[in-house]
Image (cartoon, coloured by chain):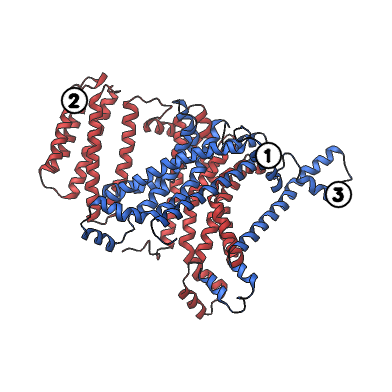
Amino acid sequence: MATMMLEIARPGTRHNPFARLAAGRILPVLVVSLALLAIWYVATIGLNARGALDQYERDERNDWTIAELIADTMRQERPLLPAPHQILVELDKSVLQIAPTSRRSLVYHGWVTLSAAFVGFAMGTLLGIVLAIAIVHVPALEHALMPWIIASQTIPILAIAPMIIVVLGSVGLVGLLPKAIISAYLCFFPVAIGMVKGLTSPDPLQLDLIRTYSATEGQLFRKLRFPAAIAFLFASLKVAIALAIVGAIVGELPTGAQAGLGARMLSGSYYGQTVQIWAALIVAAIVSGLSIAAVGLAERVTMRAMGSAP
Amino acid sequence: MKRNAIITVVAGLIALFLPLGAAGSFLAHPLALALWLVAIAAAVAPQLRALGPAAVAILTTISTALGAAALYRLILAGAIGSDALGIWVGTILLCLMLWRTLQHIAALCAATRGTAIRLAAPILVGLWALILWQIITVGFAIPGVLLPPPSEIGVAIAASLPVLGVDFMQTFVRSMIPGYVIGCGAGLVVGILVDRVPFLQRGLLPIGNLASALPIIGIAPIMVMWFGFDWQSKAAVVAVMTFFPMLVNVIAGLDALGRVEHDLMRTYAASYGQTLLRARLPAALPFIFNALKINSTLALIGAIVAEFFGTPIYGMGFRISTAAGRMDIALVWATVAVAALSGSAAYGAIAVIERSLTFWHPSLRKA
């Protein structure tokens, strides 16, 4: 922030509109994105050229030109790296053209993944908040549980996703819940850590003030600790929702590619349908970005309702 | 406090006379009976006579352990299932006793500043979780495919050590470590390079932040297609996964040096390289270590999950998915235990290095 202010204040640049744009954020992000897109196209040509050349050889064509070659690298059915516009066409086909209830629609698969992620997110958030409240109020728990909560995250939970799915499947639990449980396990950690930090964030002066009002423990929690923790809670929720979606996607891998974005990726990798994998990947990225934005929106609304600066 | 003692004695004696299923009753097993009575006595003793807090904590710990031993002895003798009521009353009583032990230890923690005391509570809880797991899975005769008892997992580990070793070499040493080094190294170098061009930095930071929140693990099938089934594709997934958290943290960390320190370096007429090496990189170390720690867990997950999309016939991910498919759940848990141990060890090693390199940081200074 400090460097940004300095640059704007430097004499001479003030009246140069480009310099002001460059000092902002939109132009740099745009330029970098365009550069990445350009690199992608170049990589498409480089990676797919071999496939196109092999095709020419099989067709015994020797009169191809460079322009034809470049065009052909972006027209293959199963390219090593599909060009961005190929993915866009696939997205248009599987998102907009097909009815959202069809099994070939990415909206349907996205919803399967997202619903599991949301249920897991809700469960994990609840567990995280309850754990944090218990830890803050019971000193014995703080010493006993905190190290294990941290250690729980060094266990690669996603690695045991297949086992959780298989085991829960053998007792008759199939579909949404097993995936949601994996999501919940990933979610609870950032929420618990953030909430413990947030609930203990009121400083001694504030605690003393509330005590001079002879507030009960419940009032102290309702009027001071919980409001103070809200900002921390939302920061954690943004991390948690992204993790929940990752958990749901990985949870779909061992179910034998039935439904969901993870299943689309898996079946795409079985059949070499690279465009399908990339389309599922892009939808996953969009869904994840939108969910984070939604949490951000909820944060802004809540913070405004609580009267803090917008 | 007297009330607690009365509850302990009454519940302990009630457990003695409850039915124990196939094992008959407590009175038929003198060893278990003796252990149980000593446990109750040790639990009650601190409430009848004033003892030091350390003595109380040790005494209650011992009593919980003896009580668990007594119950387990009965379970082995056949006290299984929901008709062995005495076992379950006893287990609940033991949980309450452990709870009081934890309170005593918390009081000790508040009074003294020893590391051993600080470790005692989490170790006790971990051990107790294992004991409870064992008592419940054996006592309720839970089928092994659902949840094997820890003892069975221990047997599986001991029996399949060579297999687990090969898997560890493939996934941890050959896939994860190269990917981790490449990803973190590239993130560090790109972060430093980008830092010289503020325009690029402002453009890359939001994109990097977005990318670290995306399900990058999804590129695993693509990488398998590009780099083949062996470790190269797994290392590539790990490298991409670890790149963005490192990039974002390096960019943030290089901004962490204060104005005053910058000015000081300038008064020394330090060059860009000297400022970077002597002031800015050390100031960025807490951020870099933060990324290294996040990445250590991410990397293991990436390496294992990438194996679900195709591997040679070894590797932790391969073992987990095939053993789960064959319902060999004990082997799955054994692999998970190895993964958890190696993940925790990697995390711990990085934390130890962090402590020795960023000892000056406020969060590590002693109060």
Distance, label 3 to label 2, CA atoms, is: 93 Å
- Residue nearest the observer in this picture, B45 or B5: B5
Res. A81 image quadrant: top right
In the image, residue A34 sits, relative to residue A258, either above or below, namely: below
* Chain of the residue that carries numbered disc 2 in the rendered image: B
- Residue receiving disc 1: A93
Residue type at the position of mark 3: Thr
Looking at the picture, how far across and down is residue A258, in whole percent?
A: 57, 31
Q: Which mark's residue is nearer the viewer, 3 or 2?
A: 3
Looking at the picture, how far across and down is residue A125, in whole percent?
A: 41, 44
Give the residue displayed 43% in from the left and 58% down from the top: B354
Looking at the picture, how far across and down is residue B60, in whole percent?
A: 20, 41
Residue neighbourhood size for the residue with mark 1, other residues' Cα within 10 Å, grouped as few (<14), some (14–19), many (≥20): some
Q: Is residue B226 left or right of residue B343?
A: right
* Chain of the residue that carries numbered disc 3 in the rendered image: A
Q: Is residue B95 left or right of residue B230?
A: left
Q: Which mark's residue is nearer the viewer, 3 or 1?
A: 1
Res. A212 image quadrant: bottom left
Distance, label 3 to label 1, CA atoms, is: 31 Å
- Residue receiving disc 3: A65
On residue B30, which mark appears? 2
Q: Residue furthest left?
A: B49
